[in-house]
Amino acid sequence: MARVLALVPDLLFGSRVQGDLTAAGHEVELIGDETRLRARLAGDGSASGAVLVVDLTDPQLDGAAILQALAAEDLLEGVRTLAFFSHVDTAVGQRARAAGFDLVVPRSRMAREGAQLVTRLADGA
């Protein structure tokens, strides 16, 4: 299955994401902030082939800007990206799509289908 880096500051939902993805056979590393994510991606190169999941519902986290900065620094080489947003905040979803996330879904869909979405991205679909 896939290695997953999950930038999900919300501990409760992060635990749910981690549990669902782990139960489906994915290896999940929860990351709580941009600084730790950046350090992880710049580390030993083991993130290549991973799926990055980003929570766009946190008002302290600008996921679209983070993605663009990481891409500009070539830290996303070989990494597929998935973002989830609050269904009532469609502008955030549109901004994430424009920023270049591979897949952008409402949080409710992430809760229902997260493991399948990650598998699909990891398989290159």
Image: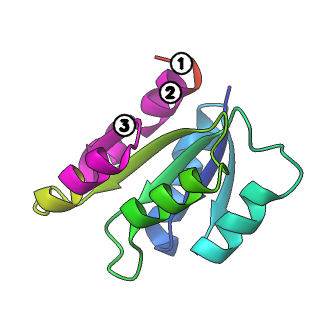
Crowding near the residue tagged with mark 2, few <14, some 14–19, many ≥20 C-alpha atoms within 10 Å: many
Q: Nearer the viewer, residue 72 or 94?
A: 72
Q: Classify mark 1: helix, strand or loop.
A: loop
Where residue 121 appears, x then y in whole percent?
50, 27
Residue position marked by numbered label 2 in the rendering = 121
Crowding near the residue tagged with mark 3, few <14, some 14–19, many ≥20 C-alpha atoms within 10 Å: some
- Disc 2/disc 1 C-alpha distance (Å): 5 Å
Circles 2 and 1, Cβ within 8 Å, touching? The answer is yes
The residue furthest bottom is: 60
Horizontal side of residue 60 vs 118, given as left or right = left
What amino acid type should be assigned to the residue bearing mark 3? Leu
Where residue 21 appears, x then y in whole percent?
57, 41
Horizontal side of residue 15 vs 42, given as left or right = left
Q: Classify mark 3: helix, strand or loop.
A: strand
Circles 3 and 2, Cβ within 8 Å, touching? The answer is yes
- Based on the picture, tell me whether residue 103 belongs to the magenta stretch: yes
Q: Main SS of the magenta segment?
A: helix
Residue position marked by numbered label 3 in the rendering = 103
The residue furthest front is: 72
The disc at residue 8 is none
The disc at residue 124 is 1
Magenta-highlighted residues: 94-121
